[in-house]
Image: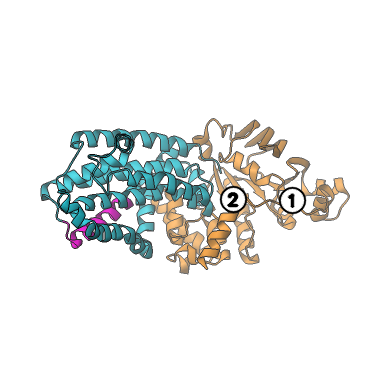
Chain colours: A cyan, B orange
Amino acid sequence: MHAIFILWLREVKKYSRSRAQIVASLGQPLLYLLVLGFGLGPVFQKSGNGSYLQFVAPGVIGMTVLFTSVFSGIALLFDRQFGFLKETLVAPVPRIRIMIGRTLGGATVAMLQGTLIFVVCLIAGFRPVSLATIPLGFVFMALIAIVFAALGTAIGSGLQDMQGFQLIMNFLVLPIFFLSGALFPLTNIPKVLAFITRLDPLSYGVDGLRGALSGLTQFGFATNLITLAAIAVALLILGAWRFSKIEI
Amino acid sequence: MIRVQNLVKKFADFAAVNDISFAVAKGEIFAFLGPNGAGKTTTIKMLTTLLPPTSGTLQLNGLDPTRQPNEVRQQFGIVFQDPSLDGDLTAAENLELHGVLYGVPRKIRRERAEMLLKLFELWDRKDTQVKKFSGGMKRRLEIARGFLHTPKILFLDEPTLGLDPQSRNQLWNHVKRINESEQVTVFLTTHYMEEADRVAQRIAVIDHGRIVAMGSSQELKRRTNTESLEEAFLALTGTTIRDETANSSDQLRQMVQMWRR
């Protein structure tokens, strides 16, 4: 328990100490929120879908949680390079606990970052549909964070260098984001695309978030919660297994 | 305490460790000497559960690192050859994290951390982030951390690399102290022959993944008809310089260091 806590604490401390990074990481979501929010707003409105800002804000929060949590897992690569990973791998603590501590820490950081973006959304003019469902929004944020922190750990366990990292960002993380319905509604899209978006775990996270914060859901809360929880368990097992196989 | 039999580690076609066998008794200080790329660190990685062997058997205190990694990890402590600190954490936090991972009770962990930080003259800087430390300070912290808990077996992989003579002296005194008072078995590698001569009771010379000689410093000198351990070492391993190819970690580390500037 102590080991899980201290590794969790490490992630949170590292986050709180990287002020410049926190500010920098606000840049991309802000662009999506402001440029797309206000740029696409009129078109979106004209096509009868209501306010684009109300639509896209949960998507941008989901995106932030996705990027932050995947990155926290992939930060394994940096720990490998700077050597700290060895220190934890030879410690007399089962590797599963080390993985859980890291993953929960990464998920917590992703939630903090998501909350920050949520506040930014509020400032930009986003209005949650009801106060009562905001806690549910945080539940979805947490699920997204755990799913993708675990995925990041699973990937990070096998990464050896920066080239691999770029590959993952461009061919896995960005598609997960663009195919999740964070930026556009998943209704009335081509069948093939609709099928692919159904395979994307983030689709359920974004849909859940949007349901909780903007009152628009396509799959329904039960489907979203169950799907995400199942994927979280599967990815935690995969991540733990991959982590236990790390060789230095 | 340590028993290694017919140990082999192959990377693709290259045998980094090629059929070595040795044993280290409880309370012994055993030195592993060899040129760069001889297989010293690879052997330590296999003993410390970081790398599975290709073939051969390993035992630490009767336990098998490949089958009982968790139990084996409770037997040893290690000071790595290359850095393993978290640069974002402070010196004190690095020690605290280590102490928690190794299950050192809070009171002892605080007391020892203070004692060690003072011993290695880092006490004034305990609340500074490690990334702001100089190379020598990092190295000292790394060693201080290695002594935070008292393991049954202590691995020291080129611990004195980049250390000033004062810290080196402290290090070896401390090693001798815990070896005598707590019967800690010590397995060390170094490039400084006089250190091995000073502390090690038995020495194995390894080259190209094979053990070429083993015995006390006296025996090695006698066998090679030389005056010093350094001469004996050169007689055993030749005078050609070995190249190690940089792996991807080294390359990335260099790249990151370039960005940081």
- SS of the residue under disc 1: loop
Query: Disc 2 marks which amino acid?
Result: Ser
Residue at x 45%, y 42% (from the top left corner): A155
- SS of the residue under disc 2: helix
Q: Position of residue A18 (x, y in %)?
A: 38, 62
Decide whether the magenta segment is chiefly helix, strand or loop.
helix
Q: Is residue A176 visible?
A: yes
Left or right, A54 with respect to B6, comes to left
| Chain of the residue under label 1 | B
Quadrant location of residue A217? top left
Q: Which residues are magenta?
A: A109-126
Residue at x 85%, y 50% (from the top left corner): B235
Cβ atoms at labels 2 and 1 below 8 Å apart? no
- Pair 2/1: label in front: 2
Residue at x 20%, y 52% (from the top left corner): A44
Q: From this view, report whether residue B68 is shown above or below residue A156.
A: above
Decide: few, some or many residues near mark 2? Use Cα within 10 Å; few <14, some 14-19, many ≥20.
Answer: few
Query: Disc 1 marks which amino acid?
Result: Pro
| Chain of the residue under label 2 | B
Which circle's residue, 2 or 1, is located before the other in the chain?
1
Q: Is residue A123 magenta?
A: yes
Left or right, B145 with respect to B204, comes to left
Q: Is residue A134 visible?
A: no
Q: Position of residue B158 (x, y in %)?
A: 65, 53
Q: Nearer the viewer, residue B168 or A99?
A: A99
Quadrant location of residue B7? top right
Q: Position of residue A80 (x, y in %)?
A: 51, 49
The residue carrying mark 2 is: B248
The residue carrying mark 1 is: B35
Q: Disc number at residue B194?
A: none
